[in-house]
């Protein structure tokens, strides 16, 4: 219990006076003043507040047009239409102002614009520009694309295609890649479990594997070839099985697989099972369209970034 | 001079001064609530209707799952008007965009990225894989798995009650003919249909059937609802159709 005997004792060791409160008969409390530096900091912050109230928007008031005091600080920025505007200080105007004046932002914009106006081959030949594209591209690729195509662009087999190899579903030209990013892509191969028997699917799979020399079952390959050419496969994959850019149908003759994990195993049975699985279930996958989310110059950088990665 | 001691030893004075201090704090928080209308931007589509609409029944139920699972503990939904955020996430969030959120999900904790504009960024099938097991698509992810979302059928028996409750706090879902007509006026016919409480269940099922967010054709799962919600976030306003000045001058 605190109790007040009113006696303020000077502590013999420190020379500081006590408050006069006594607990449990003998526990007393020092009466140290607040440190001077602390008090001054406090007074200074009160003065700072008064300044702040005047300079920045601070006090609400129904009597004013905007409903609050506007402060004395103003910001000048250019509207999208190109008009120069001046307004009271606010974070939105500040952002617009910074995007137009900040030193590193201007450098960024200049570099990005330069890339946007340069043809890809020139970028690839210029070490300075390639370096910028690789660095800048890496960060936007990380923000928007890596969730599917993975950090290095290597993709996930069966789900998201590899962007750094030589094989392209939708074409390897700068303009093809740009269209892929702008408009998105829908990869679509129908399931064949209704239209082909289990045997036919197995034979077709043997044929597909034989195209990259991974099956030697001559009888099945021969039958599979007939199925491939008569049951619709060749309509999408072409009679050469090299694929068709306009449909995004895979080239089945290269050693590169994006859906069936053939290269992931040495076991012939597992390779066959992987291809059978794709033919049986088909493929439905989607690349989102980025046109409305990304700016034109960002898309240009991404295209160049992917091209550079796949060339190296 | 008024010393601490004289306040602390005088109960009545202490109470009076405490009340004064608390009411200043209280007023500062409460008074602005009466002026909230004036802080919400009026954003119109090209056809003159409101750009920002309340959630459809499926999205609203998905939002409740978002809150139930505590996604807000790691994700904010508020892009601030800073340069780095503009470069990474897109246009800063407007007050208008969360005007029908009760409670809003602004937050400030960002263990994961901000989700205010995640709608349309990924395909729905990516969201399904990601929510089921984030590491399957983002190997370095520390986000927890939510495997039950795909396994659990969506319980939407109370969707009408939810909409009616939200209506009480000002979300314009319609129950009467007049309210429906007002919604047609404000949001256009297509949206107004989705906001009709009387058809909430059939609207919910129709949206799921049309989009099949979870990739499972014959079931409506919790995943359907949550992904429907994620896919609409930040997509209602087409910022390319607005001059930045419009939003700056509003401030």
Image (cartoon, coloured by chain):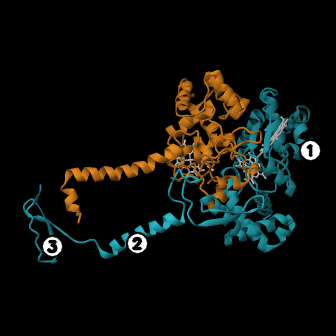
Chain colours: A cyan, B orange
Where on the picture, by quarter, is residue A243?
A: top right
- The front one of B161 and A139 is B161
Where on the picture, by quarter, is residue A99?
A: bottom right
Residue B140 image point, x, y percent = 58, 54
Q: Is residue A150 visible to us here?
A: no
In percent of the image, x 62 and y 66: which residue is there? A74
Mark closer to the observer (3, 2): 2
Q: Quadrant of the N terminus of chain A?
A: bottom left
Question: Which residue is disc 3 drawn over?
Answer: A17
Earlier residue among tags 2 and 1: 2
In percent of the image, x 68 and y 42: which residue is there? B236
Q: Dot 1 lies on which element? A: loop
| Up-down relation of residue B248 to residue B163 (above or below) | below
Q: Dot 2 lies on which element? A: helix
Q: Residues within 10 Å of mark 1 (few under 14, many from 20)?
A: few
Earlier residue among tags 3 and 2: 3
């Amino acid at each position: 219990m605190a109790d007040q005997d009113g006696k303020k004792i000077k502590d013999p060791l420190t020379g500081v006076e006590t408050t006069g409160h006594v607990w449990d008969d003998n526990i007393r409390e020092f009466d140290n003043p607040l440190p001077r530096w602390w008090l001054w900091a406090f007074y200074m912050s009160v003065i700072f507040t008064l300044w702040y109230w005047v300079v920045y928007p601070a006090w609400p008031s129904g009597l004013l047009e905007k409903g609050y005091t506007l402060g004395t600080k103003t910001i000048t920025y250019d509207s999208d239409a190109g008009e120069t505007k001046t307004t009271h200080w606010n974070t939105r105007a500040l952002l617009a102002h910074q995007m137009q004046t900040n030193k590193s932002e201007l450098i960024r914009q200049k570099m990005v614009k330069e890339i946007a106006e340069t043809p890809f081959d020139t970028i690839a030949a210029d070490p300075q520009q390639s370096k910028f594209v690789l660095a800048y591209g890496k960060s936007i690729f990380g923000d928007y694309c890596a969730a599917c195509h993975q950090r290095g662009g290597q993709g996930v087999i069966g789900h998201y295609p590899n962007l750094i190899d030589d094989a392209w579903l939708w074409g390897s030209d700068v303009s093809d890649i740009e269209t892929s990013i702008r408009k998105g892509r829908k990869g679509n191969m129908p399931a064949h479990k209704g239209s082909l028997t289990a045997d036919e699917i197995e034979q077709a799979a043997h044929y597909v594997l034989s195209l990259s020399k991974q099956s030697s079952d001559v009888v099945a390959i021969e039958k599979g070839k007939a199925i491939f050419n008569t049951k619709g496969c060749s309509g999408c994959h072409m009679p050469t099985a090299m694929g068709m850019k306009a449909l995004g149908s895979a080239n089945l003759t290269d050693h590169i697989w994006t859906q069936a994990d053939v290269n992931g195993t040495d076991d012939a049975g597992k390779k066959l099972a992987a291809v059978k699985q794709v033919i049986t279930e088909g493929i439905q996958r989607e690349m989102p369209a980025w046109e409305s989310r990304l700016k034109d110059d960002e898309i240009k950088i991404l295209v160049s970034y992917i091209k550079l990665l796949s060339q190296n | 001079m008024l010393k601490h001691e004289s306040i602390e030893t005088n109960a009545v004075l202490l109470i009076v001064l405490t009340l004064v201090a608390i009411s200043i704090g209280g007023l500062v928080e409460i008074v602005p609530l009466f002026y909230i209308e004036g802080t919400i931007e009026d954003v119109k589509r090209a056809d003159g209707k409101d750009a920002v609409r309340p959630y459809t029944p499926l999205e609203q139920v998905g939002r409740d799952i978002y809150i139930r699972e505590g996604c807000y503990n790691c994700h904010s939904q508020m892009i601030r008007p800073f340069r780095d955020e503009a470069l990474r996430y897109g246009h800063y969030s407007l007050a208008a965009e969360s005007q029908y959120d009760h409670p809003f999900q602004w937050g400030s904790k960002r263990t994961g990225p901000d989700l205010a504009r995640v709608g349309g960024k990924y395909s729905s099938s990516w969201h399904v894989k990601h929510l089921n097991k984030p590491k399957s698509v983002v190997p370095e992810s520390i986000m927890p798995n939510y495997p039950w979302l795909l396994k659990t059928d969506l319980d939407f028996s109370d969707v009408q009650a939810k909409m009616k409750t939200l209506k009480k706090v000002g979300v314009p879902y319609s129950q009467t003919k007049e309210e429906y007509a007002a919604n047609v006026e404000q949001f256009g016919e297509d949206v107004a249909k989705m906001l009709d409480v009387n058809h909430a269940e059939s609207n919910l099922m129709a949206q799921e059937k049309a989009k099949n967010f979870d990739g499972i054709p014959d079931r409506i799962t919790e995943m359907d609802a949550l992904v429907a919600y994620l896919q609409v976030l930040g997509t209602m306003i087409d910022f390319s159709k607005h001059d930045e000045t419009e939003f700056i001058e509003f401030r």
